[in-house]
Amino acid sequence: MNQYDYIIVGSGIAGLYTALLAKGQGTVLIITKGSIDDCNTKHAQGGIAAAISKNDSPELHFKDTIAAGDGLCDEEAVRILVNEAPDRITDLVNFGVPFDTIDGEIALTMEAAHSIPRILHAGGDATGEHIEVTLSKQVRSSKIRVLEECLATEVLVEKKIVKGIKALDCRTGSIEEFRCRYLILATGGAGQLFKFNTNSDIATGDGIALAYNAGAEIADLEFFQFHPTALRLPGVTPFLISEAVRGEGGILRNIDGYRFMPDYSSEADLAPRDVVARSILYEMEKTGSDRVCIDVTHLPPHVITTRFPHIYRFCLDHGRDITKGTIAVAPAAHYMMGGIKTNSWGETNIAGLFATGETACTGVHGANRLASNSMLEVLVFSKRIMEKTRKITAIEPPIISEGAEIHYSLSQGEISEVLPPPSLSALQQLLWDDVGIIRNKEGLTKSADILAAWQRSLPQPTDRPSYELNNLVLTGRLVSEAALIREESRGAHFRSDFPHGSPQWQRHIAFTQ
Ligand SMILES: Cc1cc2nc3c(=O)[nH]c(=O)nc-3n(C[C@H](O)[C@H](O)[C@H](O)COP(=O)(O)OP(=O)(O)OC[C@H]3O[C@@H](n4cnc5c(N)ncnc54)[C@H](O)[C@@H]3O)c2cc1C
């Protein structure tokens, strides 16, 4: 049978959680391009933010989220996020996620830009893995059909209503059509755009490309969060050194051992991620090094080994005992704030097409995400997708408020020079050099033009790598052009030629085909 009530593309926290809620409301198919556990979710370390302690409140969580978003959060969406957070945490506990506890109460830790400890974690620093394993076990033992090694290639839309999806069976190379009433894109982020990134291989912007090509709106893509501290060791893929390490007292030092963060921010090591990432870049430039260090040697060794067992073990496996020596780190691309524009019910501008998780842009992150709000966003808005679809009697165009948006189309790009052929490594180097932490007009124009030329020259994709490269090129164009249009610095978007914020840019940039 190829007709379902719900088809969900992706099997990270967004896909699995949504599927588990959907199974009570109809037939469900999950399509996922790797194995069920291939995703960013399982790499999440720090945890999930929720105002569940006596000293905390949704109001305080609201204020912190709005402050991080630097003028571009959708306040209604943030209210929903913080108010519905405690109930969604209860859902996860009921699904069996083993959050860490102290004296029988859920343990909460501090992370940058939160005004109070409110981060729930599991297995110390293995929160994402516990969530992914728990939810995928539940899915496997349910009636939900899961097609692994199956890559969604095209959203089927007729008369502005979604009808299903085309997908490539990566094992046989054949393309098949699947029909549904509701299609939910839960395809995650696009960290693979950049040479240095913390993401899994699957994060290739597929959802952005699928939705854009189907006529959906894509918003806020210029806001890409660079995590300040990924392990920087020769030959080792950047492994995240969670913010919680600094939350527990870790100190950033340059390679000369100097503690530099107080020179850049009164919040020192716990300043917002964009501030810390740029400060590290400046410090790397000053010292002529490609790294700085995090020092946790002043913390009791048992705190490090019990609170960060995963990080401790990973570093030890690479010859570094972090209880005795510092950890070499540098910034890396981490999280896509923008995405497929949705309203507060997860609806896109195409009837029956929903988006959730990192691929969606619900408006809660604005110009910068508050640490540990992303998995929370998944839970809150996936639940709302299910509430919405339960109530729908006839599929009609959704109501999407316009907000303060300006709509653009991609430019054609002009380039006369001879280009290297498009490849994953050339694309990642280009985006890292010209669309990275510090941007300017020249670099962004170059990137947009090269990507436009590459897009014209790419052959018809036939397998997973070629589809992914196509999707990265398109997503990279959208990121580059949005960043070029935004002539100011705000949140995670920093332009050296426009280093200040501008009130006239307190609005969103959206692209449609
Ligand atoms: C190292 C790291 C640490 C993090 N730490 C935290 C944290 O502490 N707290 C927090 O809140 N957030 C954290 N984040 C962010 C958070 O983990 C992600 O935003 C979140 O897990 C995204 O969930 P998702 O389900 O949207 O996407 P993912 O978990 O990435 O899942 C996407 C799924 O879609 C599938 N897919 C993609 N394209 C296709 C296609 N074309 N066809 C079929 N399937 C497809 C993938 O295979 C995958 O199964 C972290 C991220 C990273 C990388």
Image: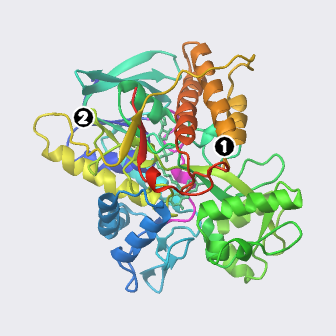
Q: Is mark 2 within 8 Å of ligand 1?
A: no
Judged from the image, the secondary structure of the residue bearing numbered disc 1 is loop
Q: Answer above or below: position of 35 versus 294.
A: above
266 or 129, nearer to the observer: 266
In depth, the one of 264 and 312 nearer the eye is 264
Does residue 121 appear left or right of residue 59 in this picture? Answer: right
Residue at which label 2 appears: 352
Q: Is residue 305 above or below residue 28?
A: below
* Residue neighbourhood size for the residue with mark 1, other residues' Cα within 10 Å, grouped as few (<14), some (14–19), many (≥20): some
Residue at 70% x, 16% y: name it: 416
Q: Quadrant of residue 380?
A: bottom left
The residue identified by callout 1 is 440
- Image location (x, y in percent) of residue 262: 71, 77
Residue 421 part of the magenta-drawn span: no
- Locate residue 54, reporting x and y percent: 37, 85
- The residue sitting at 35% across, 32% down in the picture is 216
Query: What residue appears at the point 43 percent right and 63 percent down from the top-left corner?
Result: 97
Q: How many marks?
A: 2
Q: Residues within 10 Å of mark 2 (few under 14, many from 20)?
A: many
Quadrant in which the C terminus appears:
top left
Q: Is residue 463 left or right of residue 366?
A: right
- Rendered image: mark on residue 377: none
**The residue positioned farthest toward the left in the image shown:** 393
Q: Are marks 2 and 1 in contact (CB under 8 Å)?
A: no
Q: Which residues are magenta?
A: 32-47
Q: Is residue 46 magenta?
A: yes
Name the spot of residue 53 as percent of width and height, x first: 40, 81
Q: Is residue 307 visible?
A: no
Q: Identify the residue at horizontal 70%, vertical 71% (top origin).
A: 264
Residue type highlighted by circle 2: Gly
Marks 2 and 1 sit apart, C-alpha to C-alpha, by 39 Å
